[in-house]
Amino acid sequence: MAIELVPLATATATLAPPIMLPNTPAGTRVIFEILDYRWEGSRFTARQKGSAAADWLLLGPEGTGTLDVRVTLETPDGAVVLVHYGGRVDGSNGLGGAPVYACMQFETGHERYSWLNRVQAVAKGALAGNVVTYEVYELR
């Protein structure tokens, strides 16, 4: 059975300057608070709700970055959707320009968007300055 990738959205995150925690027991923690997050797709469009959103990136000693992102979105019709994802980025030469790979899931109680609760999405993006832009696909 082949995997099908169905375009879902373009997601754009504008990041605050990082908070650095070097030499933790797990590695170097780089916390990027998310200032603005926009989700633009044909089936689901939304924007960040509130300010409790960040990537708690962990950099290993060889430069492998592990994403840990959570952001709450609100659709134009008032539905609230939590997006959370992990992933990887090669930070051995710095984070800018390196491909960022993510595996996204959604949580909502809104009936109109309940289909998102069953979606497993994947994304590829890149950091340019303080903006990460992802192309997001639904796995089928």
Image (tube, helix red, strand yellow):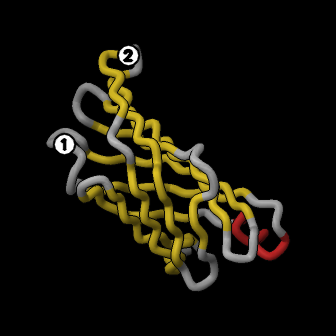
Q: Residue at x 76, y 60 (%)?
A: 108
- Residue 82 % position (x, y): 66, 55
Label disc, if present, on residue 24 of the rendered structure = 2
Q: Position of residue 40 (x, y in %)?
A: 52, 76
User: Where is residue 67 shown, x and y percent of the image?
Assistant: 43, 43
The quadrant of the rendering that contains the N terminus is bottom right
For the residue labelled by badge 1, is the local secondary structure a helix, a strand or a loop? loop
> Looking at the image, is mark 2 or mark 1 earlier in the sequence?
2
The amino acid pointed to by label 1 is: Gly
| Residue drawn at the location 46% of the way across and 49% of the way down | 34
Q: Please give left or right for residue 3 compared with residue 111 in the image.
A: left
Residue type, mark 2 in image:
Thr
Q: Quadrant of the C terminus?
A: bottom right
Image side of residue 59 versus residue 2, left or right: left
Question: Residue at horizontal 55%, vertical 57%?
Answer: 104
Does 1 appear above or below 95? below
Horizontal arrangement in the rendering, residue 114 relative to residue 124 (left or right):
right
- Give the labeled residue for mark 1: 94
